[in-house]
Image: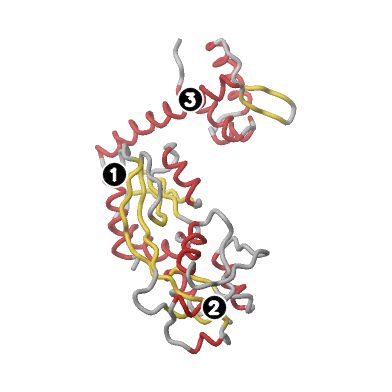
Amino acid sequence: MDLKLKDLRYLVAVADLRHFGRAAARCFVSQPTLSAQLKKLEQSLGLQLIERAPNNVSLTAAGEAIVARARRIIEASDEVVALARSQRDPLAGPLRLALLPTIGPYLLPRVAPAIRRALPRLELRLYEYQTAPMLERLRGGELDVGILALPVELDGLESHELYREAFVVALPERHPLAAHETLRVADLKGETLLLLEDGHCLRDQALEVCSRAGVREPQDFRATSLETLRQMVATGAGVTLLPELAVRGAYRGARGVALRPFARPAPVRHVGAVWRKTSARRAAIDALGKLIAEHAP
């Protein structure tokens, strides 16, 4: 039996999307072609892999088991291609880069020009994920490198710290604490602390910073972005902590918001790169990380 890599890609696409049309679009083939190839794959294996019902596509138990192995085969194949490419020119070709939503919008404008100048043949493919799905995709071979807050559970991954980023307090502009040049964590005692929704590591970091200050978290509010937090602070709903890069440049002058640094030693988050131990793109990852470390602070 001669298994074709493209058929395994078709199967994984159906497993991911649970829809033949969208799976075909992702694989750049027509739906009839994808469906016919998967039927042939099932006939070759002598197993039903996919349950087909109106408006519902699911995998059989055998299909789930084979998809798990197909992912590893595809990852290994991609690594072979990446390794060959990296040996020819390690700083060229596509590099799949993911960033946290609380990092990407503020970091990329600072580092992108330097990356384009220093690594003109590197093609960055950018993605945005929260920590858990980013790590899952890194381990699964869907991403080459992630930029996120450390530490994280590595389990087959490696990491390197790139920079440290201080937290800044965002207050309503008429808040009494806005009269201070710097603040201590203890100054936030009794304040209403506005936070991101569950799943954002910045939420956990802010809670850790303020855990001893006796702040109050409203139970009826969870923001989906730093910009929502910023706007809610401007309305007087409470205070929040923002990472330093999110209060620089165009983001510094938000109307109705006063920004105050913490007195030293200020609480910080540690931002780093994470990649697979087996990655063939280590040279490109190292070069990218060096540029980020140089231009982010």
> Spatial distance from mark 3 to mark 1, Cα to Cα?
26 Å
- Counting from the top left corner in percent of width and height, residue 112 is at 38, 60
Q: Which quadrant is the N terminus positioned in? A: top left
Secondary structure of the residue carrying tag 3 is helix
Q: Which numbered disc, 3 or 1, marks the residue that appears first in the sequence?
A: 3
Is 91 placed above or below 59 here? below
Query: Residue at position x 45%, y 23% from top?
Result: 5
Amino acid tagged 1: Arg
**What kind of colouring is applied to the model shown?**
secondary structure
- Residue found at x 62% / y 35%: 22
Identify the image quadrant of the C terminus: bottom left
Above/below status of 199 relative to 14: below
Image-quadrant location for residue 165: bottom left
Name the residue carrying label 2: 254
Q: Picture coordinates of residue 88 (x, y %)?
A: 25, 38
In-front residue for pair 203/292: 203
Query: What amino acid is at disc 3?
Result: Lys
Residue labelled with disc 1: 282
Q: Which mark is residue 134?
A: none
Q: Nearer the viewer, residue 33 or 262?
A: 262
Q: Secondary structure at mark 1?
A: helix
As drawn, is 4 to the left or to the right of 31?
left
Graded by Cα atoms within 10 Å as few (under 14), some (14 to 19) or many (20 or more), the crowding at tag 2 reads: some
Indicate which disc residue 6 carries. Answer: 3
Please report contact status of discs 3 and 1: CB closer than 8 Å, yes or no: no
Residue 37 in the image: state x and y as whole percent.
56, 19
Task: Name the one closer to the observer, 192 or 103.
Answer: 192
